[in-house]
Image (cartoon, grey):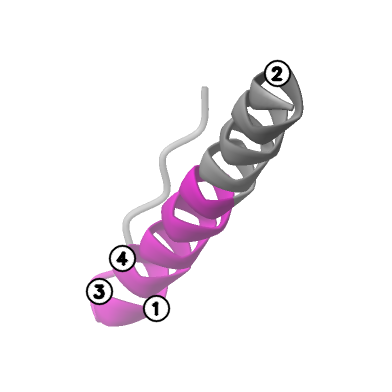
Amino acid sequence: MGSNTTVIILVVVVIGHFLLGLGYLLYKLSGKPKDQKKED
């Protein structure tokens, strides 16, 4: 069952990291009053 635990931990870490990154990005975008447009 150790394999299943590892997979679950990996999934939780990946999803958590994605949500944290997305939330941080939205926080930075909405937290800047300056109109700076970065287009790649």
Q: Are marks 1 and 4 in contact (CB under 8 Å)?
A: yes
Find residue 40 and report its horizontal and vertical position in percent.
Answer: 52, 22
Earlier residue among tags 4 and 2: 2
Per the image, the residue denoted by label 4 is: 28
Question: On the rendered image, what quadrant is the N terminus found in?
Answer: top right
| Magenta part of the chain | 16-34
Mark nearer the N terminus (2 vs 1): 2
Q: Does label 3 or label 2 sit earlier along the sequence?
A: 2
| Alpha carbon separation for disc pair 2 and 1 | 41 Å
How crowded pointer 4 is (Cα within 10 Å; few <14, some 14-19, many 20+) is rated as few
SS under mark 2: helix
Whether pointer 3 and pointer 1 mark residues with C-beta atoms closer than 8 Å, the reply is yes
Q: CA distance from mark 3 to mark 4?
A: 6 Å
10 Å neighbourhood of mark 2: few (<14), some, or many (≥20)? Answer: few
Relative to 15, does residue 22 appear above or below in the rendering? below
Chief secondary structure of the magenta span?
A: helix
Judging by the rendered image, the residue that carries numbered circle 2 is 3
